[in-house]
Image (cartoon, rainbow, N blue to C red):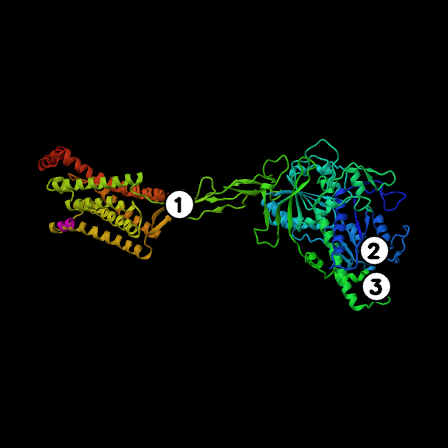
């Protein structure tokens, strides 16, 4: 049973496909180079066949063999080799539909390029001849209508873009270049890359599509390579041959190449130790390493396989053996221990490659199919006259679709599943070392976040990098900043701007900063939110301590004035200014000073209510008392009454009703306020950075301003009455002082309103306390200051004799001018 093997041992490439004038389908600019690493394909085929032939449980009494054809680049040569194999190459004459030697052909094994497999498949499909391709999986070859007898061993690359992009995300590479073949595979993978990269915010710096014939040193191709430090190369070995050759001849030590192929570069003799591919990362379908194959490689030599025409060339080239004079396939003067495993890894690798693994699995798939078909034919076809079974290759198709290979994976299963990837790191320093070290893996079936596994400490980067390379269009925005996309540029090309007030970003390259909760504040670097400390106008604060001390001192001073008035209660100055009203006013002013203490300290519901009610009632009583004093003077000197008794009753008892009436009106306003919308504890989280200020909210702004408005009306009324009585002949006339006190009171609270509404937090509370103290002090100073001056410093004026003398002198002056 013969297998036809069609794959290249030489590298055939052309620069511009300049056609040959005399030979159709050939070119003038063909180049050929022996690729020693591809010889592993033959050895993998040979190794699998020998294992199967030595296994008594697979195809007993039947031996497998193979015919090998070194496929060239041109379609003509590929089709000629296929016809020669199908017709058993009778003197290189092609006779379609006729097998000259009556050989039992089973299937064709093709690769590595999808183009080669498609060319051969087009011919074999006419005969329904089974074809197994070991090259990269291709969607065109999976079209069962056109290639119904073609089977692909390689796994699909359904998760390759996800795997590569996951690597980009892991290393924070957001600015990468793409080099792809200019064919259907390149277009499809480009679409997949764009979708996956856009989902992960990775930008493509450039896209370069390489035609299959590209091998020239185009200057324009390399112009923008320095824009990024990471470039992804996707394709198959054949389509990227020219590109890889050009890269190998350059010194591009600043680029990390991420590839899906284990490409082999045959290095020319040079004096450079640096290599452009050192530090590259390679994604390869994971598979079990075949250690028996490595042992088999060590036994391979020209003497063991004398029919092999390639082994003598390898021995002659690398082990300096000489050909015999009589036979060019016989070697003389060879090293006794010469073996392929002694060759450098960049020339020949003893570890089975992905393509060789596919060949190995493909041969086993074919053997199992033959075995199953033979068992079926034995049951259906009796042996007569010693004749064997009648076998047609097309009969294998039904079995190839269902058979399981040695690793229990069927062909149909392999065409729909993606087995995951190993990630290899190319160690090629010094140049020629050629080690591929597994540094990680990717499994799309793993849980999210566990798909990519890497051993970063094992990675060797290109020589220019001493740490993990960076590949970004713009430098990362550190925590505390956010990205701002620049118009007309990719999303990865941005500038950094600080987060707004009370917003943070604790990661790099964030689009939007996160606002801290109301109970937290952003630190100076704007990368963390810290809890705000609770604050209020406390007695421990310098401002609170100062205001509290002033309030206590003024209330104490007011009590001192009360004591003076009580001590000198029988003196003319105390009696002359309505002693009872003076006592009421002084006591009320004491409460006015003390009520300001309700605004200092930690607020609570009771304190918030007492702040406004005590302030409103105390000041109402004080202003009503001042109004009563002013009215008393007016009634005494400017109003006529019918009878002395009526005059006494009106002057003595009339002003006394002013205080309760005015107070009751304010109580009514406060009662409505406390019933409908009373003050409550509020928080100010914005005025002072890093603090939440506790304060009392007035509740109803209308009620609060109504209270202040009513006080201003009382002050204005008191000022009017005092102003009218300023020139009346009272020995101790206090009308002028009442006018000044009301004027200052009115100015203080009119100024208070705009300042109050323009301030926040502690300052607002302090402003209200200050207004209370200032207006109360004005009343105390202007009304009782002059009296205390006379009582304490000019006691001679506070006597009845002084009043009599002053009265007589005034009368004499009046008589003199009368």
Residue 687 disc label: none
Q: Position of residue 258 (x, y in %)?
A: 66, 43
Q: Earlier in the sequence, mark 1 or mark 2?
A: 2
Q: CA distance from mark 3 to mark 1?
A: 94 Å
Residue 532 disc label: 1
Check disc 2 and report the residue beneath it: 123
Kindly state the secondary structure of the residue where label 3 is placed: loop
Viewed as shown, does residue 770 lie left or right of 359? left
Q: Position of residue 442 (x, y in %)?
A: 62, 50
What span is colored magenta in the figure? 647-652
Viewed as shown, does residue 649 lie left or right of 292? left
Q: Earlier in the sequence, mark 3 or mark 1?
A: 3
**What type of secondary structure mainly makes up the magenta span?**
helix
Q: Is residue 488 visible?
A: no
Q: Earlier in the sequence, mark 3 or mark 2?
A: 2
* Front in this rendered view, residue 356 or 529: 356
Viewed as shown, does residue 486 lie left or right of 606? right
Q: Position of residue 209 (x, y in %)?
A: 72, 44
Kindly state the secondary structure of the residue where label 1 is placed: loop
* Front in this rendered view, residue 119 or 672: 119
Q: Position of residue 190 (x, y in %)?
A: 68, 48
Total numbered circles: 3
Mark 3 surroundings: few (<14), some (14-19) or many (≥20) residues within 10 A: few
Check disc 3 and report the residue beneath it: 388
- Quadrant location of the C terminus? top left
Q: CA distance from mark 1 to mark 2?
A: 80 Å
């Amino acid at each position: 049973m013969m297998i036809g093997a069609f794959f290249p041992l030489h590298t055939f490439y052309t620069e511009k496909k300049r056609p040959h004038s005399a030979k159709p389908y050939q070119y003038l600019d063909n180049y050929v180079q022996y690729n020693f690493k591809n010889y592993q394909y033959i050895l993998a085929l040979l190794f699998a066949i020998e294992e199967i032939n030595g296994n008594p449980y697979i195809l007993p009494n039947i031996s497998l063999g193979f015919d090998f054809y070194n496929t060239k680049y041109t379609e003509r040569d590929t089709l000629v080799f296929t016809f020669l194999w199908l017709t058993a190459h009778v003197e290189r004459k092609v006779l379609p539909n006729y097998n000259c030697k009556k050989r039992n052909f089973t299937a064709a094994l093709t690769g590595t390029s999808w183009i080669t497999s498609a060319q051969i498949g087009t011919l074999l499909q006419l005969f329904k001849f089974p074809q197994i391709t070991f090259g990269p999986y291709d969607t065109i070859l999976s079209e069962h209508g056109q290639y119904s007898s073609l089977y692909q061993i390689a796994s699909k690359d359904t998760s390759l873009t996800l795997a590569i992009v996951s690597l980009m995300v892991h290393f924070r590479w957001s600015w990468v270049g793409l080099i792809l073949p200019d064919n259907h595979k390149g277009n499809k993978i480009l679409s997949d890359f764009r979708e996956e990269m856009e989902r992960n915010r990775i930008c493509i710096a450039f896209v370069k599509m390489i035609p299959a014939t590209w091998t020239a040193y185009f200057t324009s191709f390399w112009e923008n390579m320095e824009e990024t430090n990471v470039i992804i190369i996707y394709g198959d070995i054949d389509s990227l041959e020219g590109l890889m050759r050009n890269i190998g001849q350059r010194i591009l030590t600043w680029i990390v190449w991420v590839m899906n192929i284990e490409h082999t570069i045959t290095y020319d003799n040079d004096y450079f130790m640096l290599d452009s591919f050192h530090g590259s990362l390679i994604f390869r379908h994971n598979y079990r390493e075949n250690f028996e194959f490595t042992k088999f490689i060590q036994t391979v030599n020209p003497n063991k396989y004398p029919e092999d025409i390639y082994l003598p060339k390898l021995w002659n080239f690398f082990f300096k053996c000489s050909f015999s004079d009589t036979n060019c396939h016989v070697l003389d003067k060879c090293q006794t221990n010469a073996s392929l495993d002694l060759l450098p890894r960049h020339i020949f690798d003893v570890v089975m490659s992905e393509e060789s693994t596919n060949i190995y699995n493909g041969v086993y798939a074919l053997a199992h199919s033959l075995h199953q078909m033979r068992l079926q034919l034995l049951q259906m076809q009796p042996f007569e006259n010693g004749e064997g079974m009648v076998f047609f290759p097309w009969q294998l198709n039904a079995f190839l679709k269902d058979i399981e290979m040695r690793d229990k994976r069927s062909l149909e299963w392999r065409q729909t599943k993606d087995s995951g990837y190993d990630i290899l790191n190319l160690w090629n320093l010094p140049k020629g070392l050629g080690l591929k070290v597994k540094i990680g893996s990717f499994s799309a079936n793993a849980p999210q976040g566990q798909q990519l596994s890497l051993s970063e400490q094992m990675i060797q980067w290109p020589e220019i990098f001493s740490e993990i390379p960076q590949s970004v269009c713009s430098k990362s925005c550190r925590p505390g900043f956010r990205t701002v996309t620049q118009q007309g540029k990719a999303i990865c090309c941005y500038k950094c701007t600080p987060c707004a007030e009370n917003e943070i970003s604790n990661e790099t390259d964030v689009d939007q900063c996160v606002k801290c909760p109301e109970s937290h504040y952003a630190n100076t670097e704007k990368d963390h939110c810290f809890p705000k400390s609770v604050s209020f106008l406390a007695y421990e604060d310098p401002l609170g301590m100062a205001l509290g001390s002033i309030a206590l001192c003024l209330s104490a001073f007011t009590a001192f004035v009360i004591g003076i008035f009580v001590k000198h209660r029988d003196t003319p100055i105390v009696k002359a200014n309505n002693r009872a009203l003076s006592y009421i006013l002084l006591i009320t002013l004491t409460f006015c000073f003390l009520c300001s203490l309700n605004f200092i300290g930690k607020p609570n519901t009771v304190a918030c209510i007492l702040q406004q009610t005590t302030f409103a009632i105390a000041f109402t009583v004080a202003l009503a008392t001042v109004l009563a004093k002013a009215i008393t003077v007016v009634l005494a000197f400017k109003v006529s009454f019918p009878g002395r008794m009526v005059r006494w009753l009106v002057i003595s008892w009339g002003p006394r009703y002013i205080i309760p009436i005015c107070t009751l009106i304010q109580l009514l306003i406060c009662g409505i306020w406390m019933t409908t919308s009373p003050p409550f504890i509020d928080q100010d989280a914005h005025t002072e950075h890093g603090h939440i200020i506790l304060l009392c909210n007035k509740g109803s702004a209308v009620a609060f301003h109504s209270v202040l408005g009513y006080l201003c009306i009382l002050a204005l009324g008191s000022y009017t009455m005092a102003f009218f009585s300023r020139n009346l002949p009272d020995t101790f006339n206090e009308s002028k002082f009442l006018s000044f006190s009301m004027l200052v009171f009115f100015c203080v609270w009119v100024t208070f309103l705009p300042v109050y509404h323009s301030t926040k937090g502690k300052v607002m509370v302090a402003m209200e306390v200050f207004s209370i103290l200032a207006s109360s002090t004005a009343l105390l100073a202007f009304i009782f200051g002059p009296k205390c001056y006379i009582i304490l410093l000019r006691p001679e004026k506070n006597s009845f004799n002084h009043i009599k003398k002053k009265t007589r002198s005034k009368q004499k002056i009046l008589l003199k001018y009368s």
